[in-house]
Structures are given as C-alpha cells and as structure tokens.
Image: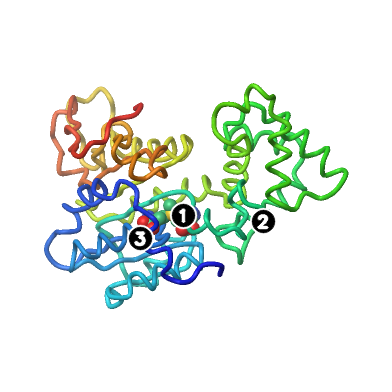
C-alpha cells in the first residue's frame, strides 16, 4: 500500500453528508437496535458519521476494495462492537445479510464510483494524470484489468464503451487510435493511453471539457468493474431488504447510474393495480415513497467545499406498506418530498 494507514483520514470529505444523515435519521433513530448498510464503505466517512449520530445502530459496511476496508476498519475502530465490515461486491448483499443473520435493514447508502484513495494512489491506474500500469480494478484480487480491455476488445466494442460509459463524442476515433497503437506494441501504461487519447481528439475539442482522457478513463473503469450491472442487481436487493419505514439513499456521479436508480425506484413507487380502479386493491399499492423530487443536486457551497460533489445526484426513498394505503383514492397520492439543505433539483 503506497499510503500510510490513517493518513487519508480527513482528506476525504463525504459528499452531501448532512443531507444523507437527515434522510436516514427517521429510519435509524427508531427505538431499539437499527441496522444500516453502507454498501460502498470507501474510507468510512459517511459510516463514521452515521455511527456517531446513532448509538443504537449496527453498521454493515461493504467494499470490494480490500485497501478501502483496511482504512475504514482503522477509522471505525472505536465502534468495533457494532460494526461488521465485509469484503464483497454490493450485489452480494443478500448473502452477506444472510450470513450475519440480519433479515431486514433500516438504512442503506450507496455512494457510487471511486474513492479518493483509489484515485490518489498512483499504482492503481485510475488517474490519467499519473503514469501507472493500466489496472483500474477496485478489487485487485479479481477480474480483468483495463490493460486487457484496451488491448483485447474489438474496435466496435471499445467504441461502444467509450461512447456509452464515457459519453465520448470521438469514441470511434479514440478506438481507432488504440487499435493502431496496439498493432505496434501493447498499451500498458496510463500515461501512454492518456497521450493517445489526447492525440485522437481534434484540437478545438481538447480545449473544453477538462482533460481529453477523462472520459475514456471513466468508461474503462466502469467496464473493468462491471459497475452498472452490479448496481442493476444490487438496488432491487437492497430495497427488498428494507424494513417498512427503512430508507435508502443513492449518490450517483454518472447519468447511467442515476437512470438505473430512478428506474429501480419508479417501479415500486407506483401502484401495480388496474389503472381504471379509483381505489387500491390489497397488495397492489406502492411499496416505496420517493423522498427526493427528481434528483437532488449539490448546492454551490457543497461544490466549493468538495469538488468531488460537482457531479453528484441524490435520490432517496422509503419502504412503505402497500396495504397501509389500501382503499385510498389513487390519484395524487404521492406525498410531497421532504426537502432540506441547499440542494437543488435535477431532471425527473
Ligand atoms: C465514493 S467511495 C465511498 C466513499 C465513502 N462514502 C466515504 O465516505 O468514505 C466508493 C467506494 O465504493 C466501492 N465500490 C464501488 N463499487 C462497488 C461495488 N460494486 N461493490 C462494493 N464496493 C464498491 C469502491 O471500492 C469505493 O471504495
């Protein structure tokens, strides 16, 4: 590990921390023991604040990155008697809860993407600004590396990933440059890849939108870690694990993550009963109440204090009993979302 344990503490500011705490509080402060899952523990910033605010709450913290888990373990040491830290991909949540004999949970947080630990450690290969082997695996004990993707995928597949996951306008040109280069020699370093991408992007386009390799690196990271597929199966599983009154908060940093979240919520926030009935039939009412209207965006002060927050979108929901609204008139049933802090709202 390139960084001393504990050195990163305090350098990572948890994104939208106050808003997350506010949204989770009604579920976690219910009487008796409550259970909170931090599905993306990272350096444990959100988790530490949750444990400090809720002395009766047991934390289940998941991360696929063993280094992140080691940092979080040190940081959360004073809460060790009510903390379970597990090396797992978050779509393994049902099995983790089974093993811990926890049938239901009261709070869940997903703070998606990479941690500052992963970005800042040069040898992980996530950062285009540093030269490192092209790895990009959040869990370096499993899966394919970015080097394998870059040197092994066909042109069409590479271009698709760059376009869809990276929203790279010049995806075809970048993929062609990669294929040309790898015919000469295998691409093994992040600096070489960043340079190739820069050269492939027309000069006028290089002047806007940050470093020209940023979008390509993001796309490769999402592909290497199968991030979207894991989220697609993890969200329904996490919603299933919530007790009635339990709450789930998702912080997304990519439009596709936010879309997956929006869809996972939408299906449960509406009735499954016949549309032409004026009242809800037993068991057909919504099982989820949306707590955010659309996606909440960070306020200017949050972004100024924490540049990582610039692209965040927050969505939150509460599990409800579908029969608690039985017989209720269906129209206009959605409650007004609670909304606090300085966050603003994004598209639906
Ligand atoms: C943005 S960081 C979380 C930061 C954390 N909230 C904090 O306050 O320190 C995201 C973390 O999620 C982990 N992660 C990403 N995808 C994951 C997945 N599918 N399963 C488990 N962990 C994942 C990453 O390894 C990373 O440590």
Which label sits in the foreground, 3 or 1? 3
Instruction: Classify the position of the C terminus by image quarter.
Output: top left
Q: Is residue 33 left or right of residue 256?
A: left
Classify mark 1: residues with Cα within 10 Å, few (<14), some (14-19) or many (20+): some
- Of badges 2 and 1, nearer the viewer stands 2
For ligand 1, give the image quadrant: bottom left
- Secondary structure under the numbered disc 1 in the rendered image: loop
Q: Residue at x 40, y 62 (%)?
A: 43
Q: For disc 2, does the CB lie below 8 Å from ligand 1?
A: no
State whether residue 91 appears in this view: no
Image quarter for residue 96? bottom left
Q: Is residue 280 above or below residue 147?
A: above
Q: Within 8 Å: ligand 1 and the Cβ of disc 1?
A: yes
Q: Which residue is mark 3?
A: 10
Label 1: which residue? 115
Q: Secondary structure at mark 3?
A: loop
C-alpha gap between disc 3 and disc 2: 25 Å
Q: Are marks 3 and 1 in contact (CB under 8 Å)?
A: no
For disc 2, the marked residue is 132
């Amino acid at each position: 590990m390139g960084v001393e344990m504990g050195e990163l503490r305090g350098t990572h500011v948890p994104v939208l921390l106050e808003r997350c705490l506010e949204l989770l509080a009604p579920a976690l402060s219910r009487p008796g023991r409550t259970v909170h899952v931090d599905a993306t523990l990272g350096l444990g910033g959100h988790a530490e604040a949750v444990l400090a605010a809720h002395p009766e709450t047991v934390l289940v913290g998941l991360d696929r990155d063993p280094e992140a888990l080691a940092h979080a373990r040190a940081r959360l040491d004073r809460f060790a008697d009510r903390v379970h830290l597990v090396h797992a991909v978050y779509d393994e949540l049902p099995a983790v809860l089974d093993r811990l004999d926890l049938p239901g949970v009261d709070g869940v947080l997903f703070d998606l993407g990479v941690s500052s630990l992963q970005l800042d450690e040069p040898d992980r290969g996530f950062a285009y600004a540093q030269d490192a082997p092209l790895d990009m695996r959040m869990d370096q004990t499993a899966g394919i590396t970015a080097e394998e993707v870059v040197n092994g995928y066909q042109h069409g597949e590479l271009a698709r990933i760059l376009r869809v996951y990276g929203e790279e306008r010049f995806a075809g040109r970048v993929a062609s440059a990669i294929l040309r280069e790898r015919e000469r020699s295998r691409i093994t370093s992040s600096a070489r890849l960043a340079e190739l991408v820069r050269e492939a992007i027309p000069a006028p386009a290089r002047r806007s939108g940050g470093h020209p390799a940023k979008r390509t690196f993001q796309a490769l990271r999402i592909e290497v870690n199968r991030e979207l597929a894991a989220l697609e199966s993890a969200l329904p599983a996490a919603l299933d694990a919530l007790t009635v009154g339990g709450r789930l908060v998702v912080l997304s940093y990519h439009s596709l993550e936010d879309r997956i979240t929006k869809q996972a919520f939408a299906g449960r926030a509406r009735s499954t009963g016949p549309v032409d009935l004026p009242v809800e039939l037993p068991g057909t009412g919504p099982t989820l109440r949306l707590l955010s209207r659309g996606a909440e965006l960070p306020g200017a002060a949050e972004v100024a204090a924490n540049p990582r927050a610039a692209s965040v979108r927050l969505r939150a929901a509460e599990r409800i009993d579908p029969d608690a609204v039985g017989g209720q008139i269906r129209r206009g049933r959605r409650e007004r979302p609670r909304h606090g802090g300085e966050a603003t709202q994004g598209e639906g």
